[in-house]
Amino acid sequence: MYEDPGAELSVFPQAGRVLAIASAGDTAAALARAGHRVTAVDISATQLAYAQARLAGAPTVTGTAERLMAVARRAAGLLVPGWRPAAMTRFLRMTDVDAQRAHWRAHLDRPMLRALMRLAFATAGLVRRDLWRALPPRMDLVLRRRLEAGLTSHPNATNPWAWRLLLGGSTDETPVEGIEWVHADVVEHLRSVPRGWYDAVTLSNVLDGPPPEFAGALAAALAHGVRPGGPVVLRTFRDTPPLPGDPLPDRSPLWGAVVRLHPLTLVPGT
């Protein structure tokens, strides 16, 4: 999922009742391991079953986006020496962000990489139009900017999301118990629980595809389902979040914004 749960853990209360989008299960698992009582919801029964099985010990299945990224990493290694696995490993072992910035500009952000990324995202748009519609225009330029910012803001050696993105691999696959799995639309689920039921919510990037009116419905549902002042974390591939919020620290280089929303300020009259 390439989601850094440090964003959630920086604002969530300890041992709270929290709601997460199930997705692949990574964030729900991290919150459960931190002592939270987690409910994982997803509108896709297939996705929910996969996340539940994975956190019970079933193997991870590589999805379309990850397969495309693996192809891109191999192609980059053939065209740009700095992207070959041995060279990339040396880069990822760095601990000085200034040295990382100099290395990125001198050895990684090369003209052949720029051409490859533009071609790769054009191809992705043909393979997965639904995925493409959720991305900003010229995602190749956007991603290069985000990579440079992310790889020069945090020490690589202690940033697992840099390692996953640039070399592949997965997060902690230790089985996790105690998560409640709910097959539902997140808005409908939040409306169905008692007022103020959740202490905190994390939404992944649920607003990166639906029509604008969904954001209003989600904001109203959050105002009902989350206790007053309870933190709500939203990620987006956009540069500007679709709902206002305060930026949170994030070590994953992919996201345009990771913010803490304020549900009770999002709905007129509340």
Image: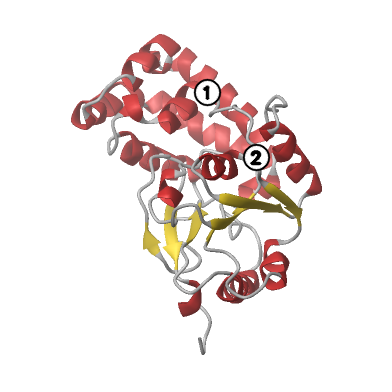
Look at discs 2 and 1 and give the one toward the viewer. 2
- Camera sees residue 197: yes
From the viewer's side, name the closer residue of 101 and 97: 97
The residue closer to the viewer here, 110 or 268, is: 268
Amino acid type at circle 2 is Ala
Q: Residue at x 58, y 23 (%)?
A: 70
Give the mark nearer the N terminus: 2 vs 1. 2
Residue 250 placement, left or right of 206: left
Residue drawn at the location 52% of the way across and 71% of the way down:
227
**Which of the 4 quarters of the picture holds residue 104?**
top left
Task: Estimate how packed mark 1 is, as few (under 14), some (14 to 19) or many (20 or more) residues with alpha carbons within 10 Å.
Answer: few
- Asked if 265 appears above or below 251 in the picture, the reply is below
Q: Position of residue 168 (x, y in %)?
A: 52, 23
Residue that appears at 70% across and 49% down: 180
Q: Which residue is mark 1?
A: 168
* Quadrant of the drawing holding the N terminus: top right
Label 1: which secondary element: loop
In the picture provided, is 156 more to the left or to the right than 137? left
- For residue 203, the mark is none
Q: Any mark on residue 24, and which?
A: 2
Distance (Cα) linking label 2 and label 1: 16 Å
Q: Secondary structure at mark 2?
A: loop
What kind of residue is marked 1?
Gly
User: Where does the image place residue 134, in percent across and percent down from the top left?
Assistant: 60, 52
